[in-house]
Image: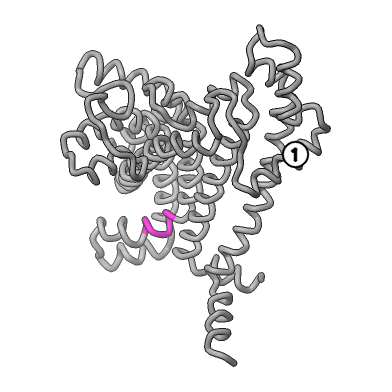
Amino acid sequence: MRPGSFLGQHILNSPLIRLLLQRLGISFIVLIGVSMLIFVIARVIPGDPARIALGPNAAPEQVASLRAAMHLDDPIVVQYGFFVLDVTRGDLGKSLYTNRPVTVDIVQFLPATLELVFAAGIIMVGLGLPLGILAARYHGRWPDNAVRIFALLTVSAPSFVWAVILMLLFAFYLPLFPIAGRISDIYEIDRVTGFMTIDTLIAGNLVAFQDAFSHLVLPAVALSLSGIGQAARLTRANMVETYEKPFIEMAQAYGFFPSRIARIYVFKPSLIPSLTIIGLDFAAMLGNAFLVEAVFAWPGLSRYGVAVILRKDLNAIMGTVLVIAITFLIVNILVDLLIAFLNPRIRYSTRVDA
């Protein structure tokens, strides 16, 4: 057997690679289903996209010409066929809202939303998990009760409510942070990654970085608060259950430090069930970000998606939904791989099942 074929066979037999291939296949099927569903829904919404795009004063001939160009007079199966053919060529069509290719709009608006979501995700994990550990470590005492009350408050109110509250507190009464946009107009930063905080560092402009970071704080915190409460509650519940296991009693009997028991013997097995929900919350932020972006005038993809839905911009709607769906699936795959890495039983059971 040639060394190359042996290496390829060894890679394919790796449990994580097999799991990755399985998840990619399932995700591809899900993506096709999502595209079909959204395509049908976008077409059955009342209103004529051609008339909405051209305005009420457009001549009937102009409307008919645009409808023919968009294949709106064809059966819906034929329309979907044209859509799939264009997607395979990397063409998502032209947006009737911005009068630009949808791919150009996505490239412009997606980095702003990703920057916001990544920042919110870091805050969610960085605060939610330690709060859950703290609540479980002091189960039944005042730190536990304080964390539970905080988690209940953050989960019970939607993100846009927290956005308004944070804006009033830290931008109006205490003018510590700006309330609109990604960076002040006085700074001209070259677009390299689309992430304003990173581009300002690449440009070597620390003052602009501080300005971009200050613009990011309030919307990121507002978007992350419900996720912080959810992560804290799940981590606490799983750790409290793990504390009742016999091996924890044995570790306590051997006289291990409580902090070591909490950090090593309780947190790691408790983290695995929480990762799935945390990953879903992280991916769901893409869809939940539109209200936060609207409150803070954040020029992101979610805000763009709301605008094109209101104008029944079919091409832009499909492009936005597909990008969000792909991001959601990627996050799910990464979470599955991380869980399999942390839990050998999952990856080896996948190998046996295959």
Nearest to the observer: residue 89 or residue 143: 89
Identify the residue at horizontal 44%, vertical 44% (top origin).
Answer: 234
What percent of the width, then of the height, locates residue 336?
A: 52, 57
Near mark 1 (Cα within 10 A), the count class, few <14, some 14-19 or many ≥20, is some
Is 222 or 238 nearer to us in this picture?
222
Q: Nearer the viewer, residue 167 or 264?
A: 167
Q: Residue furthest right?
A: 75
Q: Which quarter of the rendering shows the N terminus?
A: bottom right
Is 261 magenta? The answer is: no
x 28%, y 44%: residue: 198
- Magenta stretch encompasses residue 269: yes
Q: Please state which of residues 260 and 323 is positioned toward the viewer in this rendering.
A: 323
210 horizontally vs 310: left or right: left
Where's residue 215, x and y in %?
A: 28, 29
Quadrant location of residue 24? bottom right
Mark 1 belongs to which amino acid? Answer: Tyr
Q: Is residue 208 above or below residue 10?
A: above
Per the picture, the main secondary structure of the magenta-coloured stretch is helix
- Please give the range of residues in magenta: 266-271
**Residue annotated with mark 1:** 80
Q: Position of residue 280 (x, y in %)?
A: 51, 44
16 over 213 or under it: above or below: below
